[in-house]
Each structure stands twice: as C-alpha cells, then as structure tokens.
Image: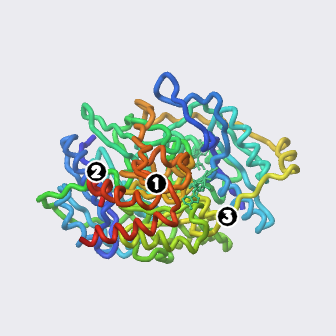
Amino acid sequence: MGNNVIAFVQCHDGEIKRTQLEAVSEGARIANALGGGCVAVVMGSGAADAAAGLGRYGARTARAIGDAAVAHYNGDIYGRTVAALAREHDAAVIVASATAAGKDLCPRVAAHLEAGYAADATGVRVEDGKLLVTRPVYAGKALIDVGFESDVAVVSLRPNNFEVSEGEGSAEVSEAQPVLEGPSAKVLETRQTAGERADLTEASIIVSGGRGMKGPEHFQLLEELADVLGATVGASRAVVDAGWRPHSDQVGQTGKTVSPKLYIAVGISGAIQHIAGMRTSGCIVAINKDPDAPIFKIADYGIVGDLFEIVPRLTEELRKVLQN
Amino acid sequence: MHTLVLIKRVPDTASKITIAPDGKQIDPSGLQFVLNPYDEFAVEAALQLKEAAGEGSVRIMTLGPKEATQTIRSALAMGADEAFHIVDDRSLRDAFSTARTLADAIAQLDPKPDLILCGRQSVDAQAMATGPMVATLLGLPCVSDIVKLERDGDTLRVEREIEGGVEVLEVGLPAVLTTNKGLNEPRYASLKGIMKAKKKKIHNPEVAIAPEKTTIVEMRYPPAREGGRIVGEGPDAVPELVRLLREECKVL
Ligand SMILES: Cc1cc2nc3c(=O)[nH]c(=O)nc-3n(C[C@H](O)[C@H](O)[C@H](O)COP(=O)(O)OP(=O)(O)OC[C@H]3O[C@@H](n4cnc5c(N)ncnc54)[C@H](O)[C@@H]3O)c2cc1C
Ligand SMILES: Nc1ncnc2c1ncn2[C@@H]1O[C@H](COP(=O)(O)O)[C@@H](O)[C@H]1O
C-alpha cells in the first residue's frame, strides 16, 4: 500500500471553487502526515489551466483530464477515472469535497477500489499513521470517529469545514485520459437555476427565513439583507411546503446541509430537522418574537422581537458599517 | 418493467438519540422507527412507473433487523408487490458492507430488476453511498439525487440537482437512481392497501453479510453550542449585534 493522497478537483472553464481548494489543502495535510504526496486529479473543462496553480495549495502532482467527454460531471465516467488514477498513483486515501459531485463520486470510487468510505467528514486526523475521520450521524445528533479496515480509504469533506492553506509550492502537471468504456448515463444539458448568489452549500453567509416571514412577498426583506452581506437566502421546510420558496432553498434534514461562517435564522422556530442542516455553522444568529423558540438555544446571538422591525434596521446598520 | 426499491428502517427524525454505554452505537429502546423519508420518494416513483406501464412489478429489499418487517409492510401497503428482507442486527452498518450485501442479494433475483431505486440518503447513517456503490458493484450506470423522472421505452430522462442548477441526463435500462425531495408526493397507504400488505410475500434471501471496511471507534454527542445569548429585544438591539459580529465573532 502506498501513502499518497488523491484530491479530486472539479473545474469548469478552468475555474475552481473554494470547496475544491479545501480538498487539495486537506489532501496535502493528510499526505504530509502519512509521509506521501498529494496528487490533484482535476477534471472538467479547462482542467490543464486549472491544474497548474494547485501546487500552491500543496499538491505535488496534478493530473489534468480536460477531454470533451468529461467537460461536465458524469459520475459513471468520473468514478472509473478517479479509481484508475488512484491505482496508478498507489493512493492510500482519496478525498473530495462533499458537493453534489463529490458525494456522488466518492462511493463509486470506494466500490471500484473495495475501500472503506466515510462521507461528509467534519474532521480528519492521522493518529499512529492511521486515518481517523469524524462525521455526523443521526442528523448531527451524534458524531462518530471512523477508522478504516481497508488499505484504501475514501473520504468526502463537508464544505466550509476545512481550511484552505496557500503557500509557495508548485505541482508537476501532466495530462491523463478518462476511462470512457463501461456503462454510463449521458449528460444532455446543464441548466443554471440560481442567479449571482453562491449556492447554499457553498455560501459563507446565509440568511434564512421561516414561517414567521408570513408570505413570499416579504422575502424581499431578506434579499436586501443578503445583498448587503453578500449572502445566500435559505428557507425552512414550512416555507418551502407553502410554496413561498423553491425546494432547492430548503435547509435541514430533508433539505441541504449547510455550514457557513454566519447563519442568520429569521422567523424560524428551530425544529430539530432544521437544526440538523445548519448546526455546524460557524456563528448562528436568531431573530424571533418568541423568547422560548428552540432556535435561541443553539444561537450564538439572539434578538427577541418582531422581524419586520428588526431586519430592516439590521440591513441599514450593516450597510452603514460595511461601507466604511 | 421490474423495479426494485431499496428501503431502510431508521429512527424517526424527531426522536432524541441516546448513546449506548459502549460508546459505539445508539440505544434503540424507546425510539420510534419509520421508513427513511427519502425512500418514500423511491417507492412512489416505482409505483408510478408500474401504473403508467400497466405491467411489471415493484419489489422491495432491505437489510435490517427483524423489526424492519414493519417498515417493509408500510412500503407494501403503499402498493409494492413483494419484499426481500436480509436480517441483520447491526445499526449503522458501513457503506461498503451494506452495498456489497445488497448487490449480492440483487444478483440472485429472478427476474432481474430493470431499475433499482434508492433514497438519496438515509437519515441515520447519512452516507449517501448505497445507490452509487450498488450500481458500481453491479456494473450498472447510476444517477443520484434525481428530482425528475420520465420514461421513454428503455430510456429514462432524469434531472438531478447540483449547486445552483440542474443536470439533465439520459440513462438506459438497467440502471440505478437515487431519489431526492421534489421528485413526487409519496402517497399514503389506504386501509385496503394495509390489509392487502399483510398477505404479501416477504422472502428471506440466503446471502452472506459482507464484512465492513470501516469501524466506529467512538460515538459521542456533538459539543454543545454555547447558545442562548440574547443580545436584546427589538430593533434597538441591532447595533450591539453588529458590534458582536464584528468584534467577537469576527465574521464581518
Ligand atoms: C421527516 C421530516 C423532515 C423535515 N425536514 C425539515 C427540513 O429539512 N428543514 C426544515 O426546516 N424543517 C424540516 N421539517 C419540519 C420541521 O419539523 C418544522 O416543521 C419546520 O422547520 C418549521 O418551520 P418554521 O420554523 O419556518 O415554522 P414555525 O415552526 O411555524 O416557526 C415560525 C417561527 O416564526 C416566529 N415568528 C412569527 N412571526 C414572527 C415575527 N413577526 N417576528 C419574529 N418571529 C416571528 C415564531 O415565533 C416561530 O418561532 C421536517 C419535518 C419532518 C417530520
Ligand atoms: N440497510 C439498507 N437496506 C436497504 N436499503 C438501504 C440500506 N441502507 C441504505 N439503503 C438505501 O440507500 C439509500 C441511501 O442510504 P445511505 O447510503 O445510508 O445514505 C437509502 O435511502 C436506501 O434507499
């Protein structure tokens, strides 16, 4: 068994999102601890351009797969390709950010390599040369430390939970070929649904509204607050079920799991299924008129009162402060 | 078309979890168990495909404790035809072992399934792994997290949610799909459905449970959040909140 680490990197038109850099940085930290090197496997359009800069995040080697057949994510093909490169580089660990692509990719790679898989890790450490992964289970009501019985370990990393470390290094870049043969679905098209805002799972600030918003028209208040903060707007299930906001905005157990630096919950009671999706946020602020709302129990800061008075004031105050 | 739906019995999401004295698993006593919420979308999708085609079958498979019979019955009551129950007493069995065992049991099925449906995620293990792993082990194509499904003969057109968008894919049968919220509105079992379910067949396939590739070294409660700090009441508390966010939390 080797001691190299593969970090999967998805790119689009040569651009790489921050979550992907988290995977490279964490991959490099693990490789250091194991005494191996980090190999970034970069897939998507413009992969060669993107690969060149990954040495700064700790990759020693970068393999670029920019073939037209993999311009868009395709789990079947990406899975085979990453598994083949893991074998070629004698990898002991494969990491990827737990984005839509990473969550879909990792179990396939683990199946190809007959490897153990730990999903959506919030912590990774190496103890006595062995990998130990911390991950939430039971909707975050418990954490487990997972050890591996297999020679190869596959880990997906919860976005916004791992540091990006930038340094001076440079990576040796070479091309690699995708493994196209085999069963696969065909990507017909990809459609953008969101506007300029970051997706909830990648946003570093989220402003979420609940039933306390009283109607879809009042979400304008949150949009304005989000504009000032550069934030993304989320929602509770009550709001989504009422049709005020789309499914893709739902935070919680049956919605998205988010982990921003700052989460502002407005008119949300804090039901256990909602908390399941946002409890690992860095800082939680709650605005609610009910002092006994459960959201206050987990919020770092709370304001009790009418959101229709508080939110506009908050937007105004932040606008003043942030412009200076 | 023969669809197989993989379902799991999980603790109700509202229930409070207690960690067992061994510090490696939960204490299941007193917990309410339900059909994994995402699996309801999978059962519903399978039933709709069968109804639209006017032929075929919907079969259910689970790996779980003997009490999972109740969970199986609830899927049968929705309208599934028969079920396969691999009995296993381990809670939180690891992803590879679960997928390998299910894949081995699926390989024995006659007729072979044309389509295998899973939920996107179990709400206890949260691995999001079983569907893509089973597909890989069986050499089938797989699309996860689907929110739309249309059938045209032996081809399925599906949409899957990604960050800030959707992907539209086409996949030929046989295939594996995992279902996300938004795909459909799962039906409630009718009284007639519940009565009929009692007579439907639950088989116990003979399959060895595959060894795990990971072990739980420790299970613990997440660190308590130091919450509960009320900055103040009404809009007058806003300046203090902003100060705290900048100076104490340093998030702005
Ligand atoms: C299987 C299952 C899965 C679920 N998954 C999710 C999930 O993924 N995400 C999720 O969010 N929920 C989920 N739920 C639902 C969850 O249990 C709650 O019902 C839901 O989160 C409640 O949404 P809410 O907080 O917006 O509404 P409510 O609970 O109705 O709370 C509204 C809050 O607004 C406050 N309020 C009202 N007016 C004002 C005002 N003028 N100013 C300030 N505050 C005001 C009220 O005090 C109250 O606290 C799930 C439930 C089940 C059973
Ligand atoms: N023990 C099991 N038996 C049958 N199906 C399962 C089992 N575990 C997981 N699944 C299926 O796989 C999906 C994803 O579960 P998981 O990979 O645990 O997040 C679930 O929604 C089920 O459809």
Amino acid bearing label 2:
Glu
Residue B73's mark? none
Who comes first in sequence, dot 2 or dot 1? 1
Tell me the quadrant of the picture where the N terminus of chain A can be found: top left
Relative vertical location of residue A282 with respect to residue B12 in this rendering, above or below = below
Q: Nearer the viewer, mark 3 or mark 2?
A: 2
Q: Chain of mark 1?
A: B
Whole-number angstrom distance, CA of label 3 to CA of label 1: 42 Å
Q: Is residue B63 left or right of residue A199?
A: right
Of pointers 3 and 1, the one earlier in the residue sequence: 3
Residue B180 visible? The answer is no
Which residue is tagged 3?
B184
Q: Nearer the N terminus, badge 3 or badge 2?
A: 3
In this rendering, is residue A164 above or below B172?
A: above
Q: Chain of mark 2?
A: B
Count neighbours of disc 2 (C-alpha within 10 A) and say few if under 14, some if 14 to 19, many if 20 or more.
few
Q: Could you classify mark 3 by the number of other residues whose Cα lies within 10 Å: few (under 14), some (14-19), or many (20 or more)?
A: some
As drawn, which residue projects farthest toward the front? B236
Q: Which amino acid type corresponds to the residue marked 3 in the rendered image?
A: Asn
Q: Nearer the viewer, residue A256 or B249?
A: B249
Q: How far is disc 3 from disc 2 in space, using C-alphas? A: 45 Å
Q: How is the image coloured?
A: rainbow
Say which residue label 1 marks: B233
Chain containing the residue with disc 3: B
| Residue at 57%, 74% in the rendered image | A217
Q: Both on one chain, marks 2 and 1?
A: yes
Residue sitting nearer the eye, A226 or A47: A226
Quadrant position of residue A35: top left
Q: Amino acid at mark 1?
A: Glu
According to the image, label 2 marks what residue?
B248
